[in-house]
Image (cartoon, rainbow, N blue to C red):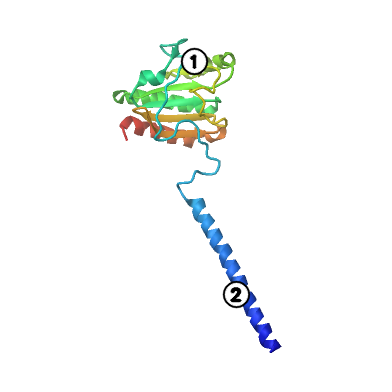
Amino acid sequence: MPRFIACGFSRMRRLRLFAAGAGVALLLVGFAIRADDPSRPAAGHLKSGPQVGDKVSTFYVRAITGPLKNKSVCYVCRNGDRPVVMVFIRQITPELKSLLKGIDSEIDRSRASGLRSFGVFLAGESQELLPQVQTLAFDEKINLPLTIAAAPSDGNAGGSIHSEAAVTVVLYRDLTVMANFACRADELHPARVEAILKAVKDLAAGE
């Protein structure tokens, strides 16, 4: 009898251990499925600016370059239903220059589509930012209008822009967001710039 009881206990213990192990395995599988779910944002993903499907709000900025220089302008209003590349900038990074020049080139190639673009620099003190924007436009020969958000920069122009986003690119048509790219300073690399410019081409083509 003692031997039978001991054997039964050992078997019961093994069953419990197997069940516990299976439970852990199922938990890990479930986690892996959730982690690989494409509907979930990637780790560290920034949600910055209006998202796909949102309507673009109107707002005024101070034009630093372009034909409306030194005026208060609503470029969202002026561009209307056209396809537009709207760039919000918190930090001037090396690849920002490539991005803006690339957008300029796409606008030149897509005149028939009515493609438009403008850049909005976000900063608390426009006096410090102004010479940087002017120098950038002059040195890199940037043609798209560059502007500075009215201070404070937490108004309609930059209220939804993530504090960690060095650059946020919003592509819209008919005042509806078609694509959104938010990048920290080190995330705006050549491959990312290429992906953004590909999306700009698609926007101009109406895709």
Q: Dot 2 corresponds to which residue?
A: 15
Q: Which element type, helix, strand or loop, lies under badge 1? A: helix
Q: How many marks on residues?
A: 2
x, y percentage for residue 58?
42, 22
Label 1, label 2: how far apart the Cα atoms are: 75 Å
> Which residue shows up at 47% across the image and 50% down it?
37
Q: Which mark is residue 138?
A: 1
Give the quadrant of the N terminus.
bottom right
Horizontally, residue 13 falls left or right of residue 162, namely right
Q: Residue at x 43, y 26 (%)?
A: 86
Q: Nearer the viewer, residue 53 or 196?
A: 53
Does residue 77 appear left or right of residue 32 in this picture? left
Residue 55: x and y in percent read: 39, 29
Q: Position of residue 94 (x, y in %)?
A: 54, 27
Marking on residue 164:
none
Q: Nearer the viewer, mark 1 or mark 2?
A: 2
Establish if 198 lies above or below 71: below
Residue at (50, 27) in percent of width and height: 96
